[in-house]
Image (spheres, rainbow, N blue to C red):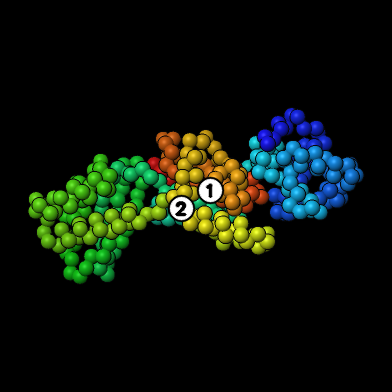
């Protein structure tokens, strides 16, 4: 049954509905007429409140999990509240500073994505998710920096200014000139190409013998290619952090739901497909409970937002997943702000 527009609800219905939803989102527990009457926000008797609760239940906005329990919002009720009644709480200056500091710690972009997922989990008290960018960077420059003790740092610079690095094992007795020769060789073949394109060209050239590299430099190039190719193949589609936070005190009363949610999160490709639905959104999208097939059984909600590079191109999607009683008013603007902050790292 479709929920009625807010304009068709009386002022009394709207006031009681808001208090029930806010009370449920705060505590995770159904809200009863006695609690509402004692709160002091309503100048109504418990009997009058019960009458309005029954009306809201008949409209499909509230439900009673047990005969003698209070009411809690249905998925339709939460949707009505989120779309028409919720007042978002913009991130504080301290929260904004914490996001920027966490994302500004440097290192490979994968580490920034890991930190972002953990950050979203900390913000929401639920699980944070970040989709790794699917577009392949076109590369500009390659260098090898000797770290000593038989290791070197391989640094790749993309055309958009993004920088990634990996540690390469050199082996014993490698001359410094081999590092320079290998780096110059790779840079010449990287320019304007993706890693896959450059790797294919270099492997073909090495296999045919059409190169002036000495044996040491040739071996170094091959080891570098192996490190980067293996990394690209193992890169996950989705990074999820904070699953343990889904096992809060309220969840312990409904372990079947939590098990269902954790099982769903194991299917990362399906979760990524859901996040893709937010890819074209201008701001955060909210998927509540049964509105998405993947998490219908676990009764979970997802808040997701795309993140864009400096030119406005969508790079990926990040979000939060947890029980339907997420603090949407706080989580939604924080997800949006985190998405904007992460996007600034991409060129």
Q: Give the crowd class for mark 1: few <14, some 14-19, many >=20 residues within 10 Å.
A: some
The alpha-carbon separation of the residues under discs 1 and 2 comes to 11 Å
Mark positioned earlier in the residue sequence (1 or 2): 2
What residue would you read off at disc 1? 294
Pick the residue in front: 12 or 211. 12
Q: Who's the residue at 52% across and 42% down the image?
A: 305
Pick the residue in front: 320 or 313. 320
| Side of 255 where 31 appears, left or right | right
In which image quadrant can residue 87 be found? top right
Residue 215 at x, y percent in the picture:
12, 61
What residue would you read off at disc 2? 268
In which image quadrant can residue 303 be found? top right
Residue 124 at x, y percent in the picture:
60, 52
Q: Who's the residue at 21% across and 53% down the image?
A: 183
Q: Who's the residue at 77% across and 37% down the image?
A: 14
Residue 170 at x, y percent in the picture:
23, 65
Quadrant the N terminus occupies? top right
Pick the residue in front: 56 or 199. 56
Does residue 195 appear in this view?
A: yes
Quadrant the C terminus occupies? top left
Pick the residue in front: 142 or 267. 267
The answer to whether the residue labelled 1 contacts the one labelled 2, judged by CB atoms less than 8 Å apart, is no
Does residue 82 appear in this view?
A: no
Give the vertical position of 3 relative to 196 (above or below): above
Residue 249 at x, y percent in the picture:
67, 62
| Side of 6 where 227 appears, left or right | left
SS state under label 1: loop
SS state under label 2: helix
Give the vertical position of 203 relative to 137 (above or below): below
């Amino acid at each position: 049954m479709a929920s009625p527009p807010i304009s068709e609800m009386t002022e009394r219905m709207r006031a009681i509905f808001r208090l029930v939803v806010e009370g449920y989102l705060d505590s995770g527990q159904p809200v009863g007429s006695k609690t509402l009457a004692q709160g002091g926000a309503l100048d109504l008797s418990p009997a009058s409140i019960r009458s309005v609760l029954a009306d809201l239940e008949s409209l499909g906005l509230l439900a009673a999990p047990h005969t003698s329990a209070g009411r809690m919002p249905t998925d339709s009720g939460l949707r009505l509240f989120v779309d028409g009644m919720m007042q978002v709480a913009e991130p504080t200056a301290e929260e904004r500073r914490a996001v920027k500091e966490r994302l500004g710690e440097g290192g490979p972009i994968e580490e920034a994505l890991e930190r972002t997922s953990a950050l979203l989990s900390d913000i929401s008290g639920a699980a944070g998710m970040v989709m790794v960018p699917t577009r392949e960077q076109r590369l500009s420059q390659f260098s090898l920096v000797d770290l000593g003790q038989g290791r070197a740092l391989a640094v790749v610079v993309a055309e958009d200014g993004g920088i990634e690095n990996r540690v390469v094992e050199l082996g014993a007795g490698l001359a410094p000139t081999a590092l320079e020769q290998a780096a110059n060789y790779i840079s010449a073949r990287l320019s304007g190409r993706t890693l896959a394109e450059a790797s294919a060209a270099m492997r073909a050239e090495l296999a045919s013998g059409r190169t002036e590299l000495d044996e040491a430099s040739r071996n170094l190039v091959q080891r570098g290619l192996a490190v980067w190719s293996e990394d690209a193949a193992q890169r996950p589609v989705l990074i999820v952090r904070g699953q343990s936070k889904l096992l809060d005190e309220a969840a312990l009363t409904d372990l079947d739901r939590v098990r269902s949610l954790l099982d769903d999160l194991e299917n990362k490709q399906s979760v990524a497909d859901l996040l893709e639905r937010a890819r074209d959104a201008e701001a955060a999208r909210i998927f509540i409970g049964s509105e998405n097939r993947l998490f219908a059984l676990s009764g979970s909600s997802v808040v997701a937002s795309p993140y864009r590079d400096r030119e406005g191109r969508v790079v990926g999607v990040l979000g939060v997943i947890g029980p339907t009683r997420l603090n949407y008013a706080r989580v939604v603007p924080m997800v949006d702000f985190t998405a904007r902050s992460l996007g600034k790292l991409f060129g």
